[in-house]
Image (tube, rainbow, N blue to C red):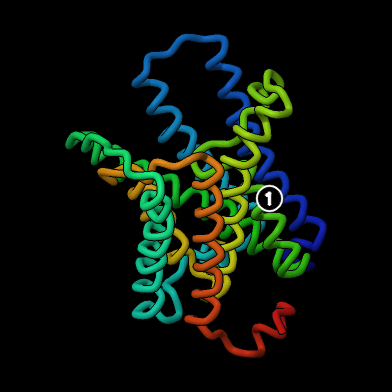
Amino acid sequence: MSTTPSKTETLVFSVVLFLIVFGIWQAYDLILANFMFSALAITIITYFVIYAICISIFALFVKLGKSSFKEHGFKEPSRPKTHIPLSIFFVLVYIIVMLMPAFLFGFTQRSPPSFLGIIFDISRALLISLTTESIFRGYIFRNLTKNQGFFIALYASSIMFGLHGYEYPVSIMNLLAMSSDEIITEILFPQILPAFTGGLFLGYMFYKMDWSLVGPIIFRTGTLLYFSFTPFIASSPWWMAITFEVMAYACLFVIVDSAIKEPRYRRRRFGLE
């Protein structure tokens, strides 16, 4: 009897994993609304405890699916001397494009973090990157690609990542208290759209790097550290910042497609030609 999960089981496991992770954050919102916590406790729970729980759930799903971590991206890139420098280069391209609006609207200076702040930000960035990339690229996208097709998997995993956001998901409790205009201008465009676009790029990058999570994790960690450590950011309207962020991902999509040439048989297999 085969122990390989069926097409339906793979789909169900992927959706259930997302719903569990998303549900944990919604439950956390309800707890914060009804109980008092210190600022330190909230910070630790938000950026460490919940993410540690989520990465543990990911590991549990890998075992329940009778697969290996290697199948979900925990392996060395096929061409590490090319893929790792490219991943760092992608971070630099993203930063340059994100700073472009500053030449029109100016820069906003930020105070440097303390020593403890630096340690916290590095730890936070690594844990967030590892967790989100493991779940959305390593598990959901990779699983759906096997049975649902490349493009369905890419869009579905990116939509889920858009709802999750870069660091924490959309709050249903907050949505219920917002007007439709507020949802559009404060949630849909500033939070969901950039994360969705980023998910498309990260998923394609994951595929291009022969299903290794090393590249996407480097990129996510680098961009998170940029927003934590940069002494200045572009001072621009929200719509301008979103436009340039989407442009950054579009540029990166083109660059990764031209810079990494996978075998033609793999492109045919996933319907890319």
User: Residue 33: horizontal and vertical position, in percent?
Assistant: 56, 13
Decide: is 57 above or below 201.
above
Residue 21: percent from left, percent from top: 61, 39
Position of the C terminus by quadrant: bottom right
Quarter assignment of residue 79: bottom left
The answer, for residue 63, to whether it is visible in the render is no
* Foreground pick, 4 / 196: 196
Farthest residue in the front direction?
104
Q: Tally the numbered discs.
A: 1
Name of the residue lying farthest toward the left: 115
Q: Describe residue 29's horizontal placement relative to residue 101 as left or right.
A: right
Q: Quadrant of the N terminus?
A: bottom right
Q: Which of 215 and 166 is in front in this view?
A: 166
Q: Is residue 272 above or below residue 94?
A: below
As displayed, is residue 128 above or below residue 245? above
Q: Where is residue 265 in the image (x, y as percent from the top left)?
A: 66, 89
The part of the image, by quadrant, that contains residue 185 is top right
Give x and y (percent) for residue 42. 42, 22
Q: Report the residue at 62% width, 42% height from top.
A: 189
Residue bearing mark 1: 159
Q: Which residue lies furthest to the bottom in this view?
A: 264
Question: What kind of element bears circle 1?
Answer: helix
Q: Which of 109 and 43 lies nearest the eye of the viewer? A: 109
Amino acid type, mark 1: Ile
235 vs 178, left or right, is left
The residue drawn where x is 66% and y is 55% is: 157
